[in-house]
């Protein structure tokens, strides 16, 4: 442990030692979870169970329908109860505490608070922090951790970690994908991942309402700054009309980013209660969307970041696009 220097990483063996005496462990990840958040959570929980811990796996949004294909998906539940006691708590893929939603409200301060993540903007809010921003997915860190722990990588653990890594690297395409990522993927396949079936569930299966959302997005898309920025918006009225769920909009932004000449894409989603969720992507390392989101209290990665901003959707869009235009303009 490095209490004197909270910015320094704990080692895997320090984390293992801290977990050893724990009988009850809670694992959780960020709200509006993606494949990395849920896959890492399930894999970690399965390993803890296999070594005899009593485990709860929570996510603010519970288990999303679109990730039901993950083996042992039922392990994940929404936070419940109050004053719940756990000997240890592990936050995965979560850059700041408030991205855990109400998870911490439901529990008493655990003796051991562990934070494992790959976000460069991670606030190191744990007592033991393992943050590797060079890792393309929290799932890849969890894999290395489980190997260090001497864990048996069961087919269910392997599929969850493969899904975590595959989804967070855009199917092994983003620039932070390394040779190690492919080595890890190879080991996971050897451990029992059915690549064809899992990939079909991840990338080739969607509810029809998501196609309707894509139709809407393509109708609404706007270009700015000589076509270097593309954006689209989704209002509460659109959500009601299209009958879409929050989980449906993940990935729609990739269609905008893929356009020739577009450097950054942004999606504005009107939430209930006067807030707007901003989701942004860059495809040029010189354009740092994490920095832009940081101006508005958000964060994430240089090439994929988000924020929640107060105000009307048009006003938020104008403010954010202006800041993004400044960032894009720096490299023009
Ligand atoms: P997405 O655009 O897919 O929601 O998120 C992209 C990345 O930005 C993810 O790594 C996510 O954790 C991070 N992110 C999204 N929204 C927020 C936010 O409101 N605050 C912070 N700190 N990070 C965010
Ligand atoms: Mn992640």
Image (cartoon, helix red, strand yellow):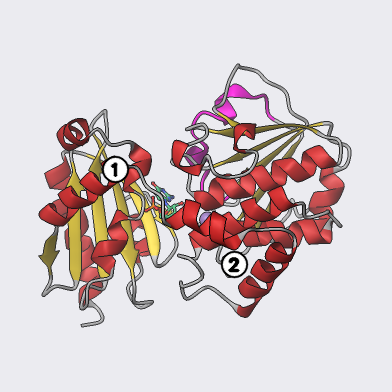
Q: Do the residues labelled 1 and 2 touch (CB within 8 Å)?
A: no
Specify whether tag 2 is near ligand 2 (CB below 8 Å): no
Q: From the image, tell me which residue sits under label 2.
A: 135
User: Image point 74% across, 50% down: which residue?
Assistant: 3
Toward the viewer: 36 or 201? 201
User: Image point 79% across, 51% down: which residue?
Assistant: 15
The image quarter in which residue 236 lies: top left
User: Image point 46% across, 73% down: which residue?
Assistant: 173
Q: Position of residue 139 (x, y in %)?
A: 62, 57
The numbered mark, 1 or 2, whose residue comes first in the sequence reads 2
**Is residue 118 at all visible to an observer of this figure?**
no
Q: Position of residue 330 (x, y in %)?
A: 24, 78
Badge 2: residue crowd in 10 Å (few <14, some 14–19, many ≥20): many
User: Image point 39% across, 61% down: which residue?
Assistant: 304
Please give left or right for residue 75 compared with residue 314 in the image: right
Residue numbers of the magenta segment: 93-109
Asked if the stretch drawn in magenta spans residue 101, the answer is yes
What label sits on residue 208 in the rendered view?
Answer: 1
**Is residue 150 at all visible to an observer of this figure?**
yes
């Amino acid at each position: 442990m490095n209490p004197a220097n909270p910015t320094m990483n704990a080692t895997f063996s320090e984390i293992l030692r801290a977990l050893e005496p724990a009988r009850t462990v809670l694992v959780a990840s960020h709200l509006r979870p993606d494949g990395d958040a849920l896959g890492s959570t399930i894999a970690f929980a399965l390993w803890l169970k296999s070594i005899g811990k009593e485990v709860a796996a929570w996510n603010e949004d519970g288990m999303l329908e679109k990730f039901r294909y993950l083996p042992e998906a039922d392990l994940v539940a929404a936070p419940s109860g109050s004053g719940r006691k756990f000997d240890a708590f592990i936050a995965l893929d979560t850059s700041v505490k408030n991205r855990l939603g109400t998870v911490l409200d439901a529990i008493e301060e655990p003796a051991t608070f562990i934070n494992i993540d790959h976000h460069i903007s991670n606030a190191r809010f744990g007592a033991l922090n393992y943050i590797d921003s060079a890792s393309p997915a929290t799932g890849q860190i969890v894999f290395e951790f489980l190997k260090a722990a001497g864990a048996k990588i069961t087919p269910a653990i392997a599929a969850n970690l493969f899904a975590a890594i595959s989804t967070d690297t855009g199917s092994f395409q983003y620039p932070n994908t390394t040779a190690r990522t492919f080595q890890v993927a190879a080991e996971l396949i050897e451990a029992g991942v059915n690549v064809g079936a899992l990939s079909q569930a991840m990338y080739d299966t969607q509810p029809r309402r998501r196609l309707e959302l894509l139709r809407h997005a393509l109708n609404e898309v706007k270009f700015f700054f000589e076509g270097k920025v593309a954006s689209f918006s989704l209002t509460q009225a659109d959500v009601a009309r299209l009958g879409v769920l929050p989980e449906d909009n993940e990935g729609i932004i990739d269609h905008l980013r893929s356009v020739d000449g577009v450097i950054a894409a942004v999606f504005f989603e009107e939430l209930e209660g006067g807030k707007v969720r901003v989701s942004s992507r860059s495809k040029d390392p010189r354009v740092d969307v994490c920095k832009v989101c940081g101006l508005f209290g958000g964060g994430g990665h240089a090439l994929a970041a988000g924020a929640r901003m107060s105000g009307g959707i048009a006003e938020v869009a104008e403010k954010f696009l202006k800041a993004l235009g400044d960032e894009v303009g720096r490299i023009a």
